Amino acid sequence: MRKAIVVFILLGLISLFADMTYEGALSIRGSYLEIIGAPIIVAGLINIGWLVSYGSRFLSGVLSDYLRKPIILWVLTVTGYLINVIVVPLLALTNRWELVLVLIVLERFGKGLRAPARDVILAEVSEGIGKGLGFGIHETMDQAGAVLGPLLASLILVASNQDYPRVFLMLGVPGVIAVVLAIIAWSMYPQPSSLATRKSMLGFKGLTRSYYMYTAGFFLFSLGFISWDIVSYHAKNIGLRGDYIALLYSIAMLVDGLLAVPSGLLYDRIGVKSTILAPLASMAAGIAFTVFIDRNPLIMAFTWGLAMGVFETNIRVAVSDLVPAEKRAFAYGFYGLVEGLAMLVGGVIQSILIAENTILLAVYIVITEFSSLIVFSRI
């Protein structure tokens, strides 16, 4: 039990440092694309990275579920973090949007490899304190890194007269720390017991009707959720400074992090029904983006952070309660694949709509999120 708690803490620290690298880069990459002359649809096409990420999550889930070897979980986890620390500094070496897009896709591939495997381990080591609270605490630590990374990026931009390559290079340091901590966690907890359960049948057998309903609602939610790449590209296009955009993202991540534990506790109290808050928050974020991005972007950042807080805690933990324990890795991988497809399609649609009229974008978000709300309410 004590070892599980230590590994639980280590997983939180790993996510903290890894998110300093990833979220720091994410906070400015949309504005960087605008600076190097990429068209706005590229900000939507960045969501190809989400599709690749969740495609690799599906692959990771399949490998973990069917090979059922503890070493697979840890190899996928460590490899994913290693890719993160290699790719982000490489962004400093190019000012061509095509290469930036390729590197972002590679980074997302690494994220996809590690996430399902890590979530299986996290669900197991957090059982003693409650999975909702455990995921909430993990999300809080994760978001500490998501706040510090963009804040670091903002400070470096100010100190270096908007030198984006320097930011990408410096963000590699916390990524190295994350890899080292992941190896330590592996050495301490090499045999997750979730893989000791009987081997599941190949395919989707064993996944529940509630899980499929939930995945459908999640697909609709992801179609409408506006990505920060589009937000930051548009913000830069209307004249906001890169360091201020990174600071806005840091504020959004702070809100996200502060909401994580209360969201997790709410999940432990009312279960999957708490996920209906996610589409409501996403609707609010879409409307706030339309109304406040050029008037009071702090309001937009606050509401976007609220949506992320519910999304990243309640929606993620629900998967583990909708399927048998032996199907968790596969279930996390498949639902992620669905999200990746939705994020790509939604990102392209959003980038087209925002080029025409931001009001059209808000209407689209409200329709998709209201549809998601209906599905979630029926689970």
Image: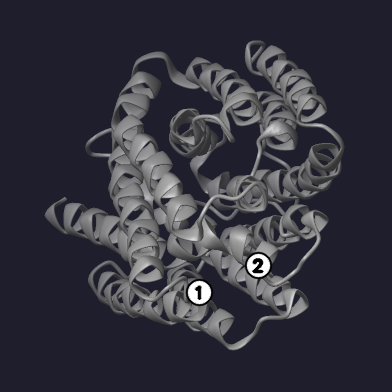
Quadrant containing the C terminus is: top right
Badge 2 crowding class, 10 Å Cα cut-off, few under 14, some 14 to 19, many 20 or more, is some
Tag 2: amino acid: Ile
SS category of the residue bearing label 2: helix
Residue 35 in the image: above or below residue 291: below
Find residue 133 and report its horizontal and vertical position in percent.
Answer: 29, 33
Q: Residue at coordinates 34% horizontally, 57% vertically from top-left?
A: 151
Choose between 9 and 30: the one closer to the eye. Answer: 30
Who is closer to the viewer here, 371 or 203? 371
Which residue corresponds to the image point at 77% horizontal and 24% vertical from the top-left?
Answer: 359
User: Measured along the vertical axis of the image, is residue 144 above or below residue 108?
Assistant: above
From the top left corner, tell me how far across and down residue 325 is, in percent: 49, 42
Image spot of residue 138 (x, y percent): 32, 46
Is residue 360 found left or right of 5 in the rendered image?
right
Residues at marks 1 and 2 touching, judged by CB atoms closer than 8 Å? yes
Corner quadrant of residue 246: bottom left
Q: Residue at x 46, y 28 (%)?
A: 299
Q: What secondary structure is found at the residue carrying circle 1?
A: helix
Q: Residue furthest left?
A: 2
Task: Write down the quadrant of residue 108 in the picture.
Answer: bottom right
Q: Dot 1, how many residues are within 10 Å of its Cα: few (below 14), some (14-19), or many (20+)?
A: many
Q: Is residue 67 visible?
A: no
Q: Earlier in the sequence, mark 1 or mark 2?
A: 2
Q: Amino acid at mark 1?
A: Tyr
Which one is nearer the viewer's eye here, 87 or 32? 32
Residue 340 in percent (x, y) is at 71, 50
Residue ID for mark 1: 164
Q: Residue at x 55, y 30 (%)?
A: 295
Residue 35: mark in rendering: 2
Is residue 330 left or right of 22 when viewed as pictured? right
